[in-house]
Image (tube, helix red, strand yellow):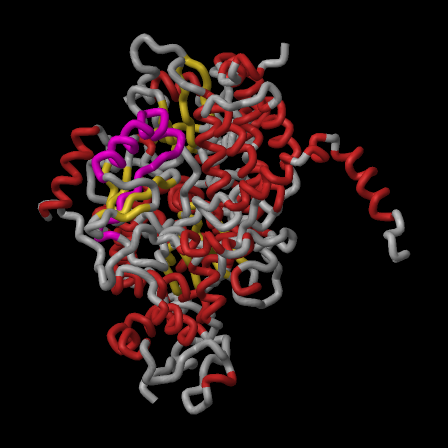
Amino acid sequence: MPDHIVPVLTAGIGERNLRDIAVYRADGGYEQLRRAFLELTPKEVADICSGSNLRGRGGAGFPTGRKWSFLPNNGRPRYMVCNCDEAEPGTFKDHMLLEETPHQIIEGILLGAYAIGCDHAFIYIRGEFKRGYEIMRDALEQARAAGFVGDNVFGSGKNLAFTIHRGAGAYICGEETGLLNSLEGRRGEPRLKPPFPAVKGLYGEPTVVNNVETLAYLPYIMRNGAEWFAKCGPERSPGYKVVSISGHVVKPGNYEVAMGTTMRQLIWDCAGGLRPGRSFRGVQPGGGSSACLFEEHLDVPYDFDSVTKAGSMLGSGAMVVFDDTTDFVKAAYTLIRFFSHESCGQCTPCREGAHWIQRTLERLLAGGGLDSDVDVIKSAAHQLTGLNLCALGDSIEPFLASVITRYEDQFRAYVPRAAVAS
Amino acid sequence: MSIGIDSDAAGGVHPGPDPGEERATWSPYVQRAGEPFDALYSQLQPQIERLVAEYEQKRSALIPLAQLFQDHEGYISADAIALIAYVVGETAASVESTISFYTLLYRRPVGKYMLQFCRNLPCMLNGADEIMAYARRRLGIGHLETSDDGLFSYEEVECLAACDRAPCAQVNLEFVYDLTPERVDALFASLRDGSSPIAPLPQTRKPGRSWKVEQDTGHKSPGAMGVSSPNNAGGIGDTSGRAIFDLIVGRPQYEQRSDERLLRETTLRVEPSENGH
């Protein structure tokens, strides 16, 4: 195992059956939940989380403790929603955690729910994860039978309801307000923000939406102390991260590393590098929505701020690696088709923009492109950015713009010679 | 009355239907007791009530209920829509609108095996295009189509979150990984002869060529699909919008720059017509 890999969430996967509550408890599972309910106040739990500087692992990287602190003290019911609607192209960490280690997710959700003082927690599982849903349902039954969920948890007198909600196939439901609409039984269209979910979320009440991986770290932060997490990696985005590496690498998979490991170490030391005889052409560091980075960025530390500084984003922590066999026009088309398909249709720039960029790329790939097409695509993608309710529309430009800038010749090569202005 | 949800038991925030009341007073779309969805309701009553009781507001149970009925009948029938509307206290139109948003909810019957091949980037980099072309050729059907024998429905879908084992696909939401032409052949063979552990979907009605409602609405107005665009007016496969678009941009005056055109057309518009108006 390469030195960079530090199994925290992924410890024991493939060795022990962590779906069994007895195995998880033998590893110290649910001990922190007991400690929280019986020994700590909600504020103490929230303070531990804030002290760890844990930042959201779902994409935006917002500090979790601060997100919780936005909840107003208005005496209204509160909700904790765990976002397991993982569908970002290239991301498959939550899928693995859900199927392999459901109990640490449940414990994390319950710890978060206790910290914010809510009595009904939800997990929204992507519709395609049928097996994951069944595993989570069985795990929840075990936890319920052990008295960790439901009425009078640990005899503390507190009640904590827990609902597993299955989605039904829509990428946009991974956006937190889209998710809440979907959870309310509506079309998963994102809402206008503000008000943010922390003020007006599920059923109009204060709600926290956190990613699976974010919440799953809570039991370990509680166990090892906030310092343990905060001291690891860069100060402003510390801790560990499960990185999904896919594309043109020898050993694609999930690798858990300390924040700040470089991308070169991740691709070559963890994922085994490129296939023999191939050379590196680019990497998307944060899933389909992130801009492509190139050779000169390989030594960038993999953490929120450094990747942003390099001109992309860490996103959900999914690296898609491209070697010299990649047709970047086809790659761009594939992603734009995805955004066009998944656009909910509320905002005209996103709905029409993605659609027309897709059509233009389609024409280019079919050999009927015009000389002006490359510029049209670039300017259309730029113009629709920033005009949408949610981040989906703004995710169209980064990859497209970065690969057109770098590999414009590949795009130009698709324009038939007859159409090139002399 | 044979059907009705106890609104207290459901923790309902919505007032919901009063069993003694004429239904028309709370929703004009929902049918009366004794009408078709009674059968569905009586078969699944315990599950329905359990799902509704999970949430503070009944409407949250809408998608879980749709999934329940789909698992039962293989698709979401008109009866199921009416029953969901009745249970959650919304109009059938509202239920229909919500269901049409989600790609895993089928409003038309589908094949016994729903094949969903991932077409997104990590799979594409690993040869998904070739695998999908191979699968289509072997099945003799295309994207969003059902085979004539009603056994297979084929769809190309977005990222399934199994990129480490690309190219991947799902059959009735069960994953199949690391696809090669040989594995695709073996998969189809095992599904055909029933030796696969993947259970078939229930099929209460014979499926048509496609399960997408948009296919039916192709001849309707552009708004019928919810999303309009000139090239895709009535949904997938509809080219009427394209023809209109070509007609418009093909006219000589549209070859002028738009600001010149605007100037000219505005001038035309402000000129008095012959009869002085």
- Total numbered labels placed on residues in the image: 0
- Residue A293 in view of the camera: yes
- Residue reaching furthest to the bottom: B20
Looking at the rendering, which quadrant does residue A87 occupy?
Answer: top left
Residue occupying image coordinates x 42% and y 27%: A319
Q: Is residue A128 left or right of residue A405?
A: left
Looking at the rendering, which quadrant does residue A318 occupy?
Answer: top left
Residue occupying image coordinates x 70% and y 35%: B254
Residue A335, relative to residue A420: is it above or below?
below
**Dividing the image into 4 quarters, which one contains the N terminus of chain A?**
top left
Question: Residue A389 magenta-drawn?
Answer: no
Q: Nearer the viewer, residue B219 or A22?
A: B219
Q: Nearer the viewer, residue B57 or A6?
A: B57
Query: Residue B157 at what x, y percent from top left?
Result: 36, 41
Residue occupying image coordinates x 48% and y 47%: A172
Q: Is residue A110 left or right of residue B234?
A: left
Looking at the rendering, which quadrant does residue A199 occupy?
Answer: bottom right
Residue occupying image coordinates x 38% and y 42%: A220
Q: Is residue A293 left or right of residue B251?
A: left
- Residue A53 in view of the camera: no
Query: Residue B67 at what x, y percent from top left?
Result: 33, 61
Tell me where the magenta segment starts and ends, as one range. Answer: B111-139
Query: Residue B5 at what x, y percent from top left?
Result: 38, 80
Query: Residue A303 at what x, y percent from top left?
Result: 50, 28
Q: Is residue B13 left or right of residue A33?
A: right
**Dividing the image into 4 quarters, which one contains the C terminus of chain A?**
top right
- Residue reaching furthest to the front: B274
Q: Nearer the viewer, residue A331 or A307?
A: A331
Question: Residue B131 magenta-drawn?
Answer: yes
Q: Nearer the viewer, residue A22 or B186?
A: B186
